[in-house]
Image (cartoon, rainbow, N blue to C red):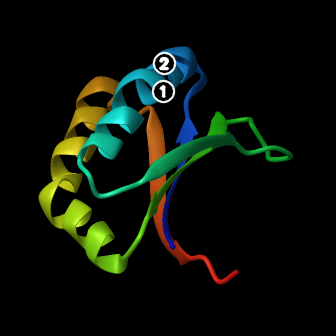
Amino acid sequence: MIIYNVTIKIDYSITEEWLNWMKEEHMPQVLETGCFTSYKLFKLLDLDETDGITYCAQYSCESIADYERYISEYTTVMRDRSTKLFGNKFIAFRTLMQQEA
């Protein structure tokens, strides 16, 4: 199994709106692409929250090919939507992981 992990630090001013958007719109839309089989959203604990709150969105897929299809066909549109809605009030970085056990 492949996990596409997106870690996002959110400015306090958009936290509630962003969380609602993630849960109600964005994450379901990512799943609707057919590239992923499930998703989870986590709040990171025990971090410095001076600049905002940090979350991890994790999307599971069966293969690298599914992930690559998402990246090539959908990622630009998805990222553009978040930037249009929230501007520079968040930062994100992405990692790709493979489950070993």
Q: What residue is at 23 percent from the left and 48 percent from the top?
A: 33
Q: Which residue is mark 2?
A: 20
Residue 56 percent coordinates (x, y): 59, 48
Q: Residues within 10 Å of mark 1 (few under 14, many from 20)?
A: few
Can you tell which mark lies on residue 23?
A: 1
User: Looking at the image, which is closer to me, 7 or 25?
Assistant: 25
Q: What residue is at 73 percent from the left and 45 percent from the top?
A: 44
User: Looking at the image, which is closer to me, 16 or 24?
Assistant: 24
Residue 57 percent coordinates (x, y): 53, 47
Q: What residue is at 86 percent from the left and 46 percent from the top?
A: 46
Determine contact: label 1, label 2, CB under 8 Å. Answer: yes
Q: Which amino acid, by three-letter code, is at mark 1? A: Lys
Question: In the rendered view, would you say 99 is above or below 21?
Answer: below
Q: Which amino acid, by three-letter code, is at mark 2? A: Asn
**Is residue 79 found left or right of 26 in the rendered image?**
left
Residue 7 percent coordinates (x, y): 55, 52
Can you tell which mark lies on residue 3?
A: none
**Is residue 74 found left or right of 38 in the rendered image?**
left
Q: What residue is at 34 percent from the left and 44 percent from the top?
A: 31
Secondary structure at badge 2 equals: helix
